[in-house]
Image: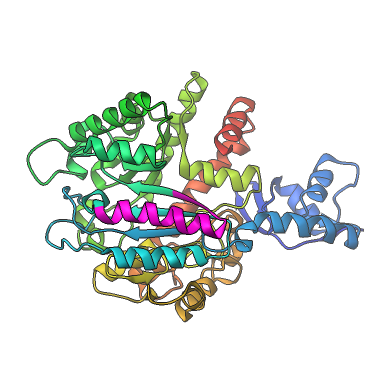
Amino acid sequence: MYRITHFNFKTDKDSYFLSNDLGNYIFLTQQEFHKLLNYSIEENTNVYSELLEKGFLYCNEEEYLQTSTQKYLDAKQCLLKSTQLFILVLTDACNQRCQYCQAGDSHAHITDINTCKKAINIAVQSPTSSVTLEFQGGKPTINQEALHFSVSYAKSVFHKAGKKVNFAIATNLTNVDEKLLKWLIAEGVSISTSLDGPKELHDINRPLAGKASSYDAWRYGLQKYRELCNEMGVSPSIGAIETTTRASLVYAREIVDAYRVNGINNLYIRPLTPLGLAKSKWKKIGYTADEYINFYNEVIDYILELWKAGEHIYETTASIYLRRILLNESVSHTEFRSPCGAGIGQLAINYDGMVYTCDEGRMLANMGDSMFRVGTVDQTYKELIQSPVVHAVCTESCLEGLPFCSECPYSPYCGVCPVVNYGMEGDLVSHSENSYRCSIARGILKHLFETIKKNDAEELEILRQLAL
């Protein structure tokens, strides 16, 4: 007789969705589910073979332990790596007045060379062979002295340590400095920018300080960057992120089309994080989880339409989830892990030399709450990573032991953010099964699994391609 392993499940009418800690899932009819629990699944059936293969039941304990141990290790590979992303904030000054961001000219803090040097010395201490330094702001290109120094110094330090360093910069691509763009291209600094949708929407969400169109300025900057890459014989290295406001909700298809028009085939659709300025303006720019889910699912359905028509468009959130679902791959994105990657996956160094668990923790500090500060650039990497704050955030973001999450069938593919929990509820752990962030994750995963359950061969192949 077979034995049943631990699994979580949910029911939808007469069918059941099951998942286990290995990241495997299965859909069962009501009759099959009851047979499983009653130990009466026939051995010569397809459903028995699938349950056995996916680790929902086993006959030989030693064989099960051998196979499941490796699968579990594969799913948790991110825990075997140390901090790989170091965010270095060069300034909080910016020429845009985005509705959801507190950066602007009213602060105008600039980091100094010494702080950058200390931050890079911390990054190189991380016991990993490859690190990414991401320059952020405000508008980090405002502080070109610190930017130039940081890239040069980091290359020297990491070369001596026998490690690889990658560079990325978050820039709105407005007020283009051709000399700086050429330098970024020559130094191999990849660009992360923001496109919130078509012109009318982008200008609402991300207005410039003056009267000019931020969309027109962004598009000119994008074209100039591509022209310079072509002149220098370098492939453009650019990614774009969308942030969803209340105004965005009626533009689902138009947002995708805006990326298509601008020759960008990979979107990163993101909900607003109710922290900082966004929290204070939530009644104006925020929305419910259900409203966001309806918007996001419309984006995904449109992307599927485009794939069927032969146009390959990707969306990062869906790709991350699908890599976990279809490929059982560990992911590096901090908010999609258990425990989350705050501290152990990324550290954020502010312009004043204060170090935080993550960029969300830094955002909270900029609004006056330093709950997630782990130390300063005058400390070592080991001292920072051993901070009680890092320990607390890791402990309180292990889904396997959290209320609600530990019983949720979507938990093998999900993650929580203690910073958002704290910002919204005053506690690292959410006390609501229907919290904003959880509801959004659950709604997206539900839609993806419903698409998988349809078992449409064409759509399944598209989902597999999106996962790659």
**Closest to the observer, 311 or 249:** 311
Query: Looking at the image, can residue 60 be seen?
Result: yes
Assess whether residue 156 is covered by the magenta stretch. Answer: yes
Assess whether residue 384 is covered by the magenta stretch. Answer: no
**Closest to the observer, 38 or 215:** 215
Residue 65 sits in which quadrant? bottom right
Does 290 sit left or right of 42 as displayed?
left
Does 110 sit left or right of 314 as displayed?
left
Task: Give the position of the N terminus as an image quadrant.
Answer: bottom right
Question: What predominant SS class does the magenta segment belong to?
Answer: helix
| Residue 367 spot, x, y in % from top left | 24, 69
Q: What's the coloring here?
A: rainbow
Q: Is residue 392 above or below residue 278?
A: below
| Residue 130 spot, x, y in % from top left | 54, 54
Query: Looking at the image, can residue 136 be seen?
Result: no
| Residue 244 spot, x, y in % from top left | 31, 46
Residue 112 sits in which quadrant? bottom left
Boundaries of the magenta span: 145-166
Does 344 sit left or right of 6 as displayed?
left
Q: Residue furthest top?
A: 309
| Residue 88 spot, x, y in % from top left | 35, 59
**Closest to the observer, 128 or 385:** 128
Task: Give the position of the C terminus as an image quadrant.
Answer: top right
- The residue at the point 21 percent across, 63 percent down is 280
Q: Is residue 221 above or below residue 127?
A: above
- The residue at the point 53 percent across, 46 percent down is 320
